[in-house]
Image (cartoon, rainbow, N blue to C red):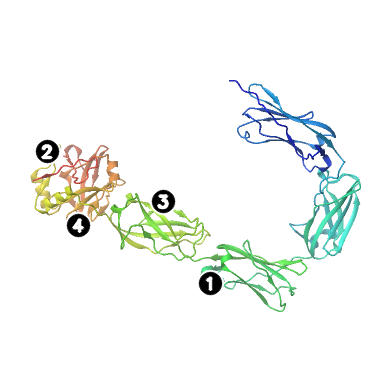
């Protein structure tokens, strides 16, 4: 493979370079960075060599960095004063090497003052506070970093601590290389208040002021009494049951004074400060809108700050559970009318539950829907506060019978879950009577009887046996007294008893074939179960019948024998007939009707 050489490589860029292509090392606060722009025809495996005079860095182009600019760093301590050519060269996979345009620059040191000195820090400070009473031997120590050239031997430093009115200064000469450099003040110089600490560095006659550190000096942090939540019952406040704002009471504390600022915190929420206007009050009351309080267990505490900005103290934390009681409405099923749902009439493979918005809903709440003991999959997590949320159930799991409909809400804040009111919905399956089905029904109602034939037109059951079945009103007998018509609708098979207004599923649940599920005394089997049975299956009429008002019969499938009911079957003695289906014929089960 021929690899074309790279062309038109522009000059690199260098950080810290002024308009005259000069770098003053004393102005640098970080390493010198050379950037190679993304060049033409860049390819994985390219070797890029970057030169800063005689100093060299290598860089390999990979899939991860191919679209990035190349950045390499050189230490200022490695680059002495002088004139340098900065350039790079690229060698591709074929060994072709191309050089970039050179950038010539001059490096100096000491010709200008260095960058702004770093801020000092104070030993013993915690965050933005310093408890003066905690300092040992009455010493306040200011530390000044001397690394990265911040301080050098011979520098003069003047440390300033100011509260805006009075300045306390201490001037020193740096005579040895230590890090940090310590400057000590007496704590007796300071009271409670807000102070700014900084220093002025004099290097070769040039003065520069450092960054400023601001600290809150405390004379003593006093323990304050717990806040009181009068609306809490057993540590719980139901926010959406309140008729007023949440009340926080602050008991009188030692040293209370007019102008004290009481800052209350509820969890991570900062409440509008309360200002003490009368120091003789035994209790101070602050009200909080429930809308700004998050549900769940929250710590409630307060701090007291003086007029001069000094912190008097902070209270212990009171644990309170803020709850929003849930008021749930009943769920509805899409398509139900007057408490009935026609599952055969649904044009979706699922049943949809509609859950209306409830009082106390929060983002992150979980909704679990139930129809009977079947749960919606998946459950719903509230992402947005909507007028309603929907859950879906597999339609194939339900039969034409009555089911309880409800849902459970699991609050995101850890409150106990709540179950909605339950309601009963009658599932029905209205079928469409095709002309073929109606023809069979008409002839049955006119007194005709029919038997089952095989593909050759031969009777699979004797007329005497058919008469016997009719006489005992077996569920498998055919005639005016008790007729069975099978049909298919919406992908499922149904059986119609001419004496019952509602069709039922004809199916057998194979999870436990010895305890079939009955509906009004009939065995149910869904189309899905028919597929499990292997498509064609057959009923043994010699063993079919009723025992104690329960149906039993034997089914032979491509997957073996299944016994339903109470009789053990001897497969060698069985005779089999095709099951009777009338109507739509989108099934592997054949339909044969013969009238007699």
Viewport quadrant of the N terminus: top right
Real-space Cα separation, disc 3 to disc 2, in angstroms: 48 Å
Q: 10 Å neighbourhood of mark 3: few (<14), some, or many (≥20)? A: few
Residue 169 percent across, percent down from the top left:
88, 58
Q: Which residue is mark 1?
A: 242
- In the picture of the structure, the residue carrying the numbered disc 2 is 457
Q: Earlier in the sequence, mark 1 or mark 4?
A: 1
Q: Earlier in the sequence, mark 1 or mark 3?
A: 1
Q: Which residue is mark 4?
A: 500
The residue carrying pointer 2 sits among few (fewer than 14), some (14 to 19) or many (20 or more) residues within 10 Å by Cα, namely: few
Spatial separation of the CA atoms under disc 1 and disc 2: 80 Å
First reached walking from the N terminus: tag 3 or tag 4: 3
Disc 4 crowd, CA 10 A, few/some/many (<14, 14-19, 20+): few
| Distance from the alpha carbon under mark 3 to that under mark 4 | 34 Å
Mark 1 lies on a secondary structure that is loop
CB-based contact (under 8 Å), mark 2 and mark 4: no
In front of the other: 11 or 443 = 11
Dot 3 or dot 2, earlier in sequence: 3
User: What number is the disc on residue 377?
Assistant: 3
- State the CA–CA distance, disc 1 to disc 3: 36 Å
**Sequence-earlier tag: 1 or 2:** 1
């Amino acid at each position: 493979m021929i690899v074309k050489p790279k062309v038109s490589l522009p000059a690199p860029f260098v950080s810290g370079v002024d308009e005259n292509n000069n770098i003053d090392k004393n102005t640098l606060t970080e390493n010198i960075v050379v950037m190679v722009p993304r060049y033409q025809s860049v390819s994985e495996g390219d070797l890029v060599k970057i030169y800063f005079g005689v100093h060299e860095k290598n860089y390999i182009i990979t899939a991860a960095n191919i679209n990035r600019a190349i950045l390499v760093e050189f230490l200022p301590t490695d680059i002495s004063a002088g004139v340098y050519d900065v350039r790079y060269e690229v060698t591709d996979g074929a060994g072709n090497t191309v050089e970039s345009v050179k950038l010539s620059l001059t490096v100096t040191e000491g010709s200008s003052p260095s960058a702004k000195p770093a801020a000092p820090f104070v030993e013993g400070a915690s965050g933005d506070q310093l408890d003066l009473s905690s300092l040992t031997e009455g010493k306040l120590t200011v530390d000044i970093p001397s690394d990265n050239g911040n301080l050098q031997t011979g520098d003069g430093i003047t440390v300033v601590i100011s509260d805006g009115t009075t300045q306390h200064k201490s001037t020193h000469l740096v005579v040895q290389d230590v890090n940090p450099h310590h400057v000590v003040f007496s704590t007796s110089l300071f009271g409670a208040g807000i102070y700014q600490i900084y220093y002025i560095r004099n290097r070769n006659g040039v003065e520069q002021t450092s960054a400023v550190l601001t600290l809150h000096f405390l004379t003593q942090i006093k323990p304050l009494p717990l806040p009181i939540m009068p609306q809490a019952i057993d540590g719980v406040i139901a926010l959406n049951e309140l008729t007023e704002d949440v009340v926080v009471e602050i008991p009188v504390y030692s040293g209370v004074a007019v102008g004290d600022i009481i800052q209350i915190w509820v969890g991570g929420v900062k409440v509008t400060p309360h200002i003490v206007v009368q120091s003789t009050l035994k209790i101070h009351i602050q009200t909080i809108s429930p809308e700004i309080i998050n549900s769940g267990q929250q710590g409630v505490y307060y701090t007291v700050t003086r007029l001069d900005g000094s912190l008097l103290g902070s209270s212990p934390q009171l644990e309170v559970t803020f709850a929003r009681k849930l008021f749930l409405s009943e769920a509805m099923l899409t398509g139900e009318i007057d408490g009935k749902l026609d599952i055969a009439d649904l044009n979706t493979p699922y049943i949809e539950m509609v859950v209306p918005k409830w009082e106390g809903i929060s983002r992150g709440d979980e909704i679990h829907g139930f129809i009977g003991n079947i749960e919606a999959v998946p459950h719903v997590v509230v992402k947005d506060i909507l007028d309603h949320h929907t859950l879906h159930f597999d339609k194939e799991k339900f039969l034409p019978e009555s089911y309880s409909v409800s849902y459970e809400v699991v609050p995101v804040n850890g409150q106990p879950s709540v179950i909605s009111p339950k309601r009963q919905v009658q599932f029905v399956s209205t079928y469409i009577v095709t002309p073929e089905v109606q023809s069979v029904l008409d002839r049955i109602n006119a007194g005709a009887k029919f038997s089952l034939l095989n593909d050759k037109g031969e009777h699979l059951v004797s007329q005497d046996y058919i008469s016997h079945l009719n006489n005992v009103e077996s569920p498998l007998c055919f005639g005016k007294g008790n007729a069975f018509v099978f049909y298919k609708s919406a992908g499922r098979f149904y059986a119609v008893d001419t004496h019952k207004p509602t069709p039922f599923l004809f199916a057998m649940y194979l999870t436990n074939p010895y305890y079939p599920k009955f509906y009004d005394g009939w065995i149910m089997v869904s189309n899905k179960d028919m597929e499990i049975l292997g498509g064609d299956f057959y009923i043994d009429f010699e063993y079919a019948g009723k025992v104690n008002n329960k149906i039993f019969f034997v089914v032979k499938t491509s997957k073996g024998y299944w016994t339903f009911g109470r009789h053990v079957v001897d497969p060698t003695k069985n005779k089999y007939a095709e099951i009777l289906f009338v109507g739509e014929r989108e099934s592997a089960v054949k339909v044969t009707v013969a009238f007699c």
